[in-house]
Amino acid sequence: MLDGKSLEYEDKKIELPEPITGDVLKVEEAMVMLPGKINAKMESQIFLTLPTGVVYVLPILKTTTTLENTQIHLREKVYFEYDSKKPESCVLQSFPNTEFDGKITARIPLSAYKYFASLR
């Protein structure tokens, strides 16, 4: 199960935590930077929502944290660059090659199978 809120089987029910969400600070090549320290080491995907409503679902390779930020390293390159300090300068580098300005938001759903693995 991915991005669910609960799992129920017979008389057992498990509630999962809410997904990790936040505003994106920066996107470069195959890296997304989010504010704060985020524990997403066990998660597999990040959803990036552009101001246009388009959602990119990208596989996570690994995460690293600094004193102030978390870098989500992706398994593939993202075909746009974004900096929250200059949101008006974002252009998609692949079809449909559109420009946009505004915030990009991130959502990292928590996956249940990894939750169950931690119960062993």
Image (spheres, rainbow, N blue to C red):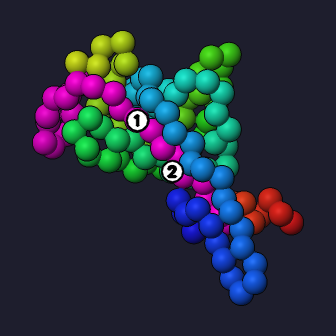
For this orientation, the residue located farthest to the top is: 85
Name which residue lies at 22% across and 39% down: 52
Question: Would you say residue 81 is visible in this rendering?
Answer: no
Q: How packed is label 1: few (under 14 Cα within 10 Å), some, or many (20 or more)?
A: some
Whether residue 76 is situated above or below residue 34 in the rendered picture = below
116 vs 22, nearest the viewer: 22
Name which residue lies at 30% across and 37% down: 50
First to last magenta residue range: 89-113
Gap between marks 1 and 2 measured at Cα: 14 Å
* Count of numbered circles on the image: 2
Name which residue lies at 25% across and 44% down: 53
Give coordinates of residue 68: x percent, y percent.
62, 17
Contact between labelled residues 2 and 1, with CB atoms less than 8 Å apart: no
Q: Which mark is residue 105?
A: 1
For this orientation, the residue located farthest to the right is: 120
25 vs 79, nearest the viewer: 25
Name the residue carrying label 2: 45
For this orientation, the residue located farthest to the front is: 11
Say what secondary structure mark 2 lies in: strand
Q: Quadrant of the C terminus?
A: bottom right
Does the magenta-highlighted stretch encompass residue 93?
yes
Say left or right for 83 vs 33.
left
Of the residues shown, which amino acid type is indicated by label 1?
Thr
Say left or right for 16 vs 1.
right
